[in-house]
Image (spheres, helix red, strand yellow):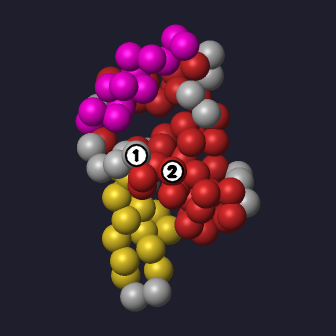
Amino acid sequence: RQDSIRKIVLFLLSPQPRPANNLQLSQGVGLSPSTVSWHVQKLLEAGVVLKEQRGRESYFSVRNPAQTAQLLIHHQKSFFDELVDNFAEVWQQM
């Protein structure tokens, strides 16, 4: 239910090319790279996000996109967040 974490997960679920590195996440969700790193670490620990090493860069993706999207859709009313509502509509149309 944390806004920053939700933004990161929604960004990683978006139809744009994924996985994304920390800089792409930071720019995509409008948070500082250090803040994104902190939240991504929590998502990694929770098993929501996967980390792929490519040389010196780390790239992140959602472990189970369909299940994660369904959870967001199921709980969208509790978020009171237009971004989640919009995502849920797009995901259901796919």
Q: What is the chief secondary structure element of the magenta stretch? A: helix
Left or right of 36, for residue 40: left
Residue 14 picture location, percent across and down: 43, 45
For label 2, the crowd category at 10 Å Cα-Cα, with few meaning under 14, some 14 to 19 and many 20 or more, is: some
Q: Quadrant of the C terminus?
A: top left
Secondary structure beneath dot 1 equals loop
Q: Position of residue 22 (x, y in %)?
A: 56, 66
Q: Amino acid at mark 1?
A: Ala
Residue type at mark 2: give it: Lys
Whether pointer 2 and pointer 1 mark residues with C-beta atoms closer than 8 Å, the reply is yes
- The residue beneath circle 2 is 42
At 68% from the left edge and 64% from the top edge, which residue is drawn? 34
Figure check: 5 above or below 30: above
User: Residue placed farthest to the top in the image?
Assistant: 77
Range shown magenta? 66-78
Residue located farthest toward the bottom when viewing the structure as drawn: 55
Quadrant of the rendered structure where residue 74 is?
A: top left
Q: Which residue is mark 1?
A: 46
